[in-house]
Every structure is written in C-alpha cells, then in structure tokens.
Amino acid sequence: MAAAEPVARPTGPEPMPSYAQLVRRGWGSALAAARGCTDCGWGLARRGLAEHAHLAPPELLLLALGALGWTALRSAATARLFRPLAKRCRLQPRDAAKMPESAWKFLFYLGSWSYSAYLLFGTDYPFFHDPPSVFYGWSAMARCRLTASSISQVQRWGLTKLARLVWNSWPQAVLPPQLPKVLGLQGLSSSWDYRYHNVGILVLFLHDISDVQLEFTKLNIYFKSRGGSYHRLHALAADLGCLSFGLSWFWFRLYWFPLKVLYATCHCSLRAVPDIPFYFFFNALLLLLTLMNLYWFLYIVAFAAKVLTGQVRELKDLREYDVAEAQSLKPSKAEKPLRNGLVKDKRF
C-alpha cells in the first residue's frame, strides 16, 4: 500500500463508535486502502513476509516443546485427576467419558482468560479502554508478556485438535462449531509471527470468557446426576451458566469485539501505521470470525426460545460423543420407529 504520514496520537482515549460508525468508517478506510494500493499482489506479500515475519529457531523450539508439554500435562491430569474424580463421584458412563475433556478445557480457558484480563487491567496496557492504542508504536512492540498468552493458545488448541482429527472420526455436525476456533488459531499464530500481539490479547480476552462459561455449564450438567441421585445445586448452576453464556456471547463477541477490535483494525490501524502489512488479510479473518459469532448466536437464541416455550425442559450435552453414538444407532427390523420421538435414519 502507498505510504502516508501517520496521524498524531490523540491526547485521550477515543470514544467507542456505534455500529453505523463502524460500518461507515471501516468501509471507507478499506476502500481508500484498496485504491491506494498500487503494488498489491504476491510481490508485496512476499516483501511483507520477508520484512515482518521473523521466527527465530528458539521460538519454534519453544512452540514445539510447549505443545508437547501441554499434551503431557493433559494426559497426566486426565489419568490421575479427572478420571478418578469421575469414578469417585459415580458419574453416568457418558458423562464420565466427557468430563475429563471439559474439566481440562475449563481450567485452561480460565487460566488463559485470567492472564489476558491481568494484562489488560492489571498492567499499564490501555488496549481495552483505548483500542486504537494497540497500533501505537507498532514497530517496537514487545514480545514478552503478550506472547505468552498467544503462544499457549496456539500450542494447546492446535495440537489437541490435530490429534482429534487424526485419531477420531468426527461427525460433520461437530466440524462447524470448530470453524471459529480455526479462524482464531490462524489469527493467533499470525499475530505472533507478524507482531500483532496487542490485538491478539484483546481478542483472547473477548472470546475466552464464553468458553469458560460453556465448559463450566457442561461440567455442572455432568455432575447433576451422579451416585444415583439428582443434585439440584448443579442443575441450578448449569441453568445460570447457560444464561450467562448467552449474555456474554452477545456482549463480548457481538458488541465489544466489533466495536473495539474491528474498529481498531479496520479504521484506526491505517491512521497509526499507514503502510501496515497484511491489512486485508487480518481484517478478513476478523470479519469472518465476527460472522461466525453471529451465526452461532442465532443458534443460542433458537435454543433459548425452545426453553421458554417448553420444548426443552432440561439441559443436556448432546454434542461430540452423543452425536457420534446417535449416528451409529439404527433401529432393528423388529423395532417400530417412534412417530413423535426418534426419527428413523435421521441425519445430524
């Protein structure tokens, strides 16, 4: 893109825009960037990679060792902590099989989100209250505290999902929920490589909170029926977790995320760094992530409508293991398929 003089930094935090201002200013900045990009193409991309993508061998070694370390830690925690706990609490077989994964995810996401919250509110980083500041001094960004959160997410999520794709037969219904994670993984790994850590830490803070609440809700669903009895406290916690999950999904991912992150990357980035590399690539990833968040929020609203109308009376985890088992279940010849229950040969 054609170089231009950067605009002077504002004296105070810029007010958060409205949705209309986001669309108008973001679209205008993107059009201006496209018109001013006289040398766009593979040549510019190769130069950007050569100038800004620097991964030293120690960093690659850290990524590999960290991924193996997270895998070993998860295996040890599953074998020595989570499975014995499920056995001791006498969970139902299906719940006992799913509990270790949810427990691990809950602890990891809680730690990751807490660390990102500490960086945003416990240090001198002003990124949450002043999102355009993520690009101030972009060429001199530090890679110490900010890198730790991004690299841990890339290590844990990337290796875990790769293992599941290789060793497990995933039904097609499980793949769509992973698309936001794929986009997030691509953005995190690229932000680590191209020095966009400031934006990455804000994205992690706005997204991990929903994952924490989701896994918390699933854990309470597993523990509400254990030892042959029904525990109302876990049922209530599951209901409250489901409610907070839907509210936080809208507030963090559909309100704060576009008005803070997208506004900063689409509009403010060009003011602070007029020739910022990979402008269209990163904004396309973030826009796709926003669309996926909106897509899944519609499912959340539809589920809430079923609960309010009485179509769903109890929260259950019907994903992953249950879906795979449901696909393998077929009625025998002697069985008469239910008209108002299971649908014969239903595809999930």
Image: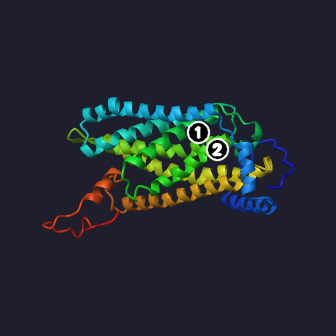
Residue 334, relative to residue 179: is it above or below?
A: below
Q: Which numbered tag is attached to residue 191?
A: 2
Q: Earlier in the sequence, mark 2 or mark 1?
A: 1
Q: Nearer the viewer, residue 30 or 43?
A: 43
Return the x and y of residue 68 as percentages of the image width and height. 47, 34
User: Could you tell me the amino acid type at mark 1?
Assistant: Ser
Residue 39 seen anywhere in this rendered image of the structure: yes
Q: Nearer the viewer, residue 175 or 245?
A: 175
Structural distance between the alpha carbons of marks 2 and 1: 8 Å
Q: Is residue 101 left or right of residue 285?
A: left
Bin the neighbour count of mark 2 within 10 Å (Cα to Cα): few under 14, some 14-19, many 20 and up.
many
Residue beneath label 1, please?
150
Mark sitting on residue 12: none
**Is residue 224 visible from the viewing direction of this image?**
no
Location of the C terminus by quadrant is bottom left
Q: Secondary structure at mark 2?
A: helix
For the residues labelled 2 and 1, say whether their Cβ atoms are less than 8 Å apart.
yes
Q: Identify which residue is drawn at 34% across, 53% down.
A: 318
